[in-house]
Image (tube, rainbow, N blue to C red):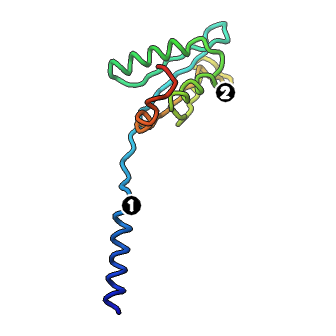
Amino acid sequence: MKNILFLLLATIISSVSLAQEKETAKTYSYAYIEVSKKTLSKKLKVSVDLGESIEQQEKGQQWSAELTNKTSHAAILNYMAERNFSLVETIARPHPHDTEAGATDGIIFIMRKSNDQDQQTVNSPVVD
């Protein structure tokens, strides 16, 4: 009886351990987005940095051109969210010549996207 119980327990443990999926290490792509106001305007100047490769630089320049002249920070975040990026951190750049507390020269958004999402959203309606 003890042998049967031990065998049953060993079988259950081994089947549970085999049934568990191995977690694959997630990899992320990051975007560094600098946003500042244009002089004497409510429009924003945007610079998107996606990385060092030629393809990343070209896409960053394209997105920078599309986002520049927007008037809302939320529009920039929504644009990136449509491309499966999520906000990681926001940094306010202090104005170098202004002594007022809270005076900023711009905002930096650090965003990331799971590389697994690239495969899940192949049929996405968003055109880059």
Q: On the image, numbered disc 1 is attached to which residue?
A: 20
Q: Between residues 32 and 91, which one lies in front from this camera angle?
A: 32
Type of the residue with mark 1:
Gln
User: What residue appears at the point 62 percent right and 22 percent down from the top-left corner?
Assistant: 75
Q: Secondary structure at mark 2?
A: loop
Above-or-below relation of 23 to 32: below
Which-is-in-front pick, marks 2 and 1? 1
Q: Using residue 44 as the reference point, say whether residue 12 is left or right of it.
A: left
Type of the residue with mark 2:
Gly
User: Residue 18, located in which quarter of the rendered image?
Assistant: bottom left
Q: On residue 102, which mark appears?
A: 2
Q: Using residue 28 as the reference point, say whether residue 66 is left or right of it.
A: right
User: Residue 11, located in which quarter of the rendered image?
Assistant: bottom left
User: What residue appears at the point 65 percent right and 23 percent down from the top-left corner?
Assistant: 103
User: Residue 42, located in which quarter of the rendered image?
Assistant: top right
Q: Position of residue 65 (x, y in %)?
A: 51, 12
Quick one: quadrant of the N terminus? Answer: bottom left
User: What residue appears at the point 36 percent right and 66 percent down from the top-left corner?
Assistant: 17
Above-or-below relation of 75 to 25: above
Q: Position of residue 26 (x, y in %)?
A: 39, 44
Q: Marks 2 and 1, Cα distance to the nearest angstrom?
A: 51 Å
Q: Are marks 2 and 1 in contact (CB under 8 Å)?
A: no
